Image (cartoon, grey):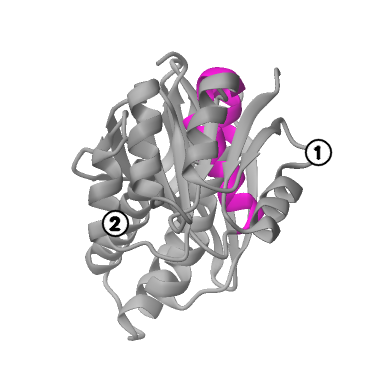
Amino acid sequence: MEKVRVMVVDDSRISRMMISSMLAKTNFEVCGMAENAAHAIDLYAKIRPDVVTMDMNLPDVDGVECSRRIHALDSHCKIVMISAMKDAKLIMHGRLAGISAFLQKPVCTNELLDTLMILCQDHVGINTVYRESYVSTFAKVLQEGLQSVAGLESEIAVDEEASGALSLNGVAVVIGIVGEPRGRITFYMDEAVMLKFAGQVLQQEDVSEAEASAVVEESGNIIAGHGISRINDVIKEREMRLTPPGIISGVDITLSNPELTAFNIKAKTSLGDIFLNVGFARSV
């Protein structure tokens, strides 16, 4: 994979050094740094980086205005704002100025890399983006969702499927992804885990299968929605939406779609294993 060239704009030398350190030994390389808007605009025109990280507070004009001027030079520029602020008004003005994504300081390495990878997927390769950013986002959301919905701690593992075929037993919530990219999300577990999971969510011992099924359906819908929303927050040019969830149950169920590149995320919990299978179309 070719290196992706990053220009860092920040008036703080320490912040510039931190971002550079985060990108060291990755496929992203810092090709230039600027400490103010005037320098950033001039440098962008000269080196034409693949992506820009932009601070909000610059000594001459703010990061939104700097981004607007860079966008006037290159309407296809990709800009990630990294600022201590991340409010709705800032995001609204930033979107109008051409800013693609917003991260809040202190930003962690994985969050920065995920964002850059999704924005620069034409350079990185879409399958790499699916694996390293989209699926890693869903893995985090699954872990967080199980904690918030059911108070469950979990250990997460991710495997790539050989094809879009998925075999399962028990109960599964199937949700389509429409937009770009399109795909499918399946949240599933076996029947014994379903009953224990629903009991923990509802905080009661006796749960009917109908109630348990409804709990799983709603939980899967919530987790899928959070994952899609996080990815949509990063990408402004592309937008994914979810179809209404459907639920199936039984033994030796096979869901097949050979057009999908699918990944299986397993959450190991005290109640048993809970899974989230995420598949994306092979071409976008």
- Our reading of the magenta stretch's main secondary structure is helix
Q: Quadrant of the C terminus?
A: top left
Compute the Cα span from label 1 to label 2: 32 Å
Residue 25's disc number: 1
Q: Nearer the viewer, residue 255 or 134?
A: 134
Q: Residue at x 47, y 54 (%)?
A: 58
Q: Quadrant of residue 271?
A: bottom right
Taking 257 as reference, is 107 above or below it?
below
- Which residue position holds label 2? 90
**Would residue 200 be found to the left or right of residue 5 on screen?**
left
Residue 268 placement (x, y as % from top left): 61, 62
Q: Nearer the viewer, residue 270 or 228?
A: 228
- Check the image and name the residue furthest to the bottom: 204
The answer to if 111 sits in the magenta stretch is: yes
Residue 282's disc number: none
**Would residue 22 be found to the left or right of residue 101 on screen?**
right
- Give, as a single range, the part of the protein colored magenta: 108-131
Q: Residue at x 29, y 52 (%)?
A: 91
Q: Residue at x 43, y 64 (%)?
A: 145
| Circle 2 SS class | helix
Question: Of the residues tagged 1 and 2, which is closer to the observer?
Answer: 2
Q: Earlier in the sequence, mark 1 or mark 2?
A: 1
Residue 56 placement (x, y as % from top left): 43, 55
Question: Within 10 Å of the Cα at label 1, are there few (<14), some (14-19), or many (20+) other Cα atoms?
Answer: few
The residue under label 1 is which amino acid type? Lys
Q: Nearer the viewer, residue 179 or 192?
A: 179
